[in-house]
Image (spheres, helix red, strand yellow):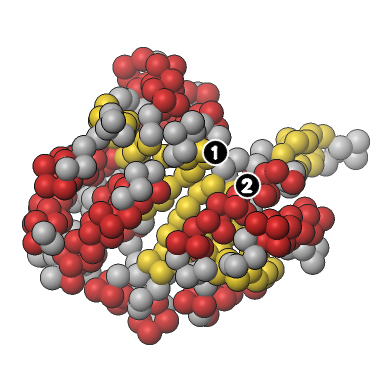
Amino acid sequence: MSNPSLLILPGDGIGAEVMEEVKKIITWFGDKRGLNFDVSEDLVGGAAYDAHGTPLHDDTMAKAQEVDAVLLGAVGGPKYDVLDFSVKPERGLLRLRKEMDLFANLRPAQCFDALADFSSLKKDIVAGLDIMIVRELTSGSYFGEPRGISDLPDGQRVGINTQRYTTDEIRRVARAAFELAKRRNNRVCSMEKANVMESGILWREEVIWVHENEYPEVELSHMYADNGAMQLVRAPKQFDVIVTDNLFGDILSDCAAMLTGSLGMLPSASLGAPMENGRPKAMYEPVHGSAPDITGQGKANPCACILSFAMALRYSFDAGEEATRLETAVEKVLADGVRTADLLPAGDTSPVSTSQMGDAVIAALDASL
Ligand code: NAD
């Protein structure tokens, strides 16, 4: 059987720097665990614009459609701020998500014990936190029509966006959430605003339909999204999997992410429909951007990108045990006090560099054998 295929798109700024560390880890899994991938690499974002005049070349898009998983670093940077909206680096990322139809965005919020002090919340509220937010990514208010800004007869202007969801759009993301819950602690909390929005009523009804007809063994609860935001900062450990729409998910996942401390620690996955081989279309990427303020200085924390690769092992390559091995290696490195600058108080003089952090994770992987 051929090896699973992985397309690496390092992108811009620290995206390229953190991806170098992930490449070392991919090699480690090949050498030490016999887990080999057919890896190809290409350009996205500003790097693609510099080479081709477009943030995502058609050939790269075609490759992304064919591989088993895409691993992306980050895109963007001040150099590209002057570009027309249609060729900005972020358009490359949006095109990948749209054309691969990646409708389920998985954002874990996991608090490693060693970093519990970094949260803005009290340690006992976040220590041991492990929740997963599933955000619908391809529909809702960010895409619904009509939209736009127009003039009113009385001289005012009006801005319109439309919250719109169909049965299928809700059911498929609900299924993704129930499937995840089965691999975790078997609980899903669905969040919407069914008290004031018809789209929220439909959301709730369709999630209940999927639950009753396909996943009755999973525990389902419902919460209004505003209460959900309060509960996330009051008692986040009450949740296992949260499923919600694009707009609420955007806000709730950022809120949950910050419970855990640093942007440099946050992975994500975006999944679509299953391909012919049964694997979902998938793109994995750290939540952070290209961080121009620290680019080229060896300061970037590679853990978010490394943990994104761990998600790829789990959700694309059926290698859950190896994913856990990698996550445990990261946890051990942090417990040993190895820290990049973002994980230390300002002015601390003991940070390790990006590549030293990658090497420390590899040493911990070696020790796990
Ligand atoms: P950012 O995430 O790049 O940086 C925010 C802050 O967090 C910066 O101070 C940065 O130094 C720090 N930071 C981020 N990742 C880090 C890491 N791994 N290790 C240590 N520190 C880290 O967000 P921004 O500054 O708002 O945006 C910079 C550029 O990135 C912009 O062009 C923006 O459009 C783009 N961006 C891209 C993505 C993406 O590719 N998915 C996401 C967000 C922003």
Amino acid at circle 1: Ala
Q: Which mark, residue 149?
A: none
Q: Residues within 10 Å of mark 2 (few under 14, many from 20)?
A: some
Seen as rendered, the residue at the extreme front is 1
Tell me residue 79's x, y (percent).
34, 30
Front residue of 184/339: it is 184
Q: Quadrant of the N terminus?
A: top left
Circles 2 and 1 in contact, beta carbons < 8 Å: yes
Amino acid at circle 2: Arg
Tell me residue 110's x, y (percent).
38, 66
Q: Residue at x 55, y 69 (%)?
A: 187
Seen as rendered, the residue at the extreme bottom is 124
Q: Quadrant of the C terminus?
A: bottom left
| Residue at image mark 1 | 273
Q: Answer with left or right where residue 349 lies relative to residue 110.
A: left
Is residue 231 something that shows in the picture? yes
